[in-house]
Amino acid sequence: MTPQRSAYTRRTVLKSTAAATAVTHLTSAPAIADDGGTSEITLSVNGQRHRVAVEPRVTLLDALRERLGLTGTKKGCDRGECGACTVLVDGERIKSCLTLAVMRQGAEITTVEGLARGEELHPVQEAFIRRDAFQCGACTPGQIMSAVACINEGHTGSEAEIREWMSGNLCRCAAYQNIVAAVADAAKETPR
């Protein structure tokens, strides 16, 4: 007698799980319009509200760069490995290439463009310049945003702690020693 095959395979379970997850995340998103699959969403970025039309699959990174023209946030690996796309969402650092724009409605998003107050740089930006904590600049916006979060989270007690909490941000030029020094300097200057 031949054993009966189950109606459930690994593939059907994964597909149904993915579909259920998508439905769960997208139910809080606005309804898709009839104009080819775009949604009208409002993103609060650097203290300003922006109404933007995006497809549900557009990442926050692409919405920031391509729809809002905020190109300070860099696209590095597009897989969440390098940290060049790091932004703050409700004060927490995230990799914007790994989240959908429609999922971030109602959240306060801060990009590197939103750190300075007029002509006055944020203490982390000043420390990066003072300590020469960048070379090619590809990773710098993500490093700065991660450093702001690292300081706000209170993870600057030692050089080893800074290295650990900044480890999600890669620097192709290997300016790590200067980055750590800049974070330590800025931590002394930043009120919490």
Image (spheres, rainbow, N blue to C red):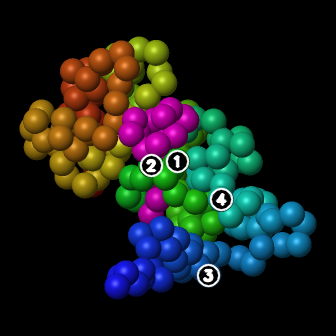
Query: Quick check: marks 1 and 2 in contact, CB under 8 Å?
Result: yes
Name the residue that disc number 4 marks: 57
Identify the disc placed on residue 95.
2
Query: Quick check: marks 4 and 3 in contact, CB under 8 Å?
Result: no
Identified at 63% across, 36% down, the residue is 71
Among all residues in the image, which is located at the extreme right? 35
Q: What residue type is labelled 4?
A: Arg
Q: In the figure, is residue 62 to the left or right of 87?
A: right
Question: How many neighbours does mark 4 have within 10 angstroms: few (below 14), some (14-19), or many (20 or more)?
Answer: few
Image depth: mark 3 or mark 2 in front: 3
Q: What residue type is labelled 2?
A: Lys
**Disc 1, SS:** helix
Image coords of residue 2 (percent x, y): 37, 81
What segment carries the magenta color? 74-90
Image coords of residue 190 (percent x, y): 29, 44
**Disc 2, SS:** strand
Kindly report the secondary structure that dominates the magenta region of the rendered protein: loop
Name the residue that disc number 3 marks: 27
Which badge, 4 or 3, comes first in the chain's sequence?
A: 3
Which badge, 3 or 1, comes first in the chain's sequence?
A: 3
Q: What residue type is labelled 3?
A: Thr
Identified at 34% across, 36% down, the residue is 169
Identified at 80% across, 65% down, the residue is 37
Image coords of residue 14 (percent x, y): 46, 70
Q: In the figure, is residue 148 to the left or right of 155?
A: right
Viewer-proximal residue among 105 and 110:
105
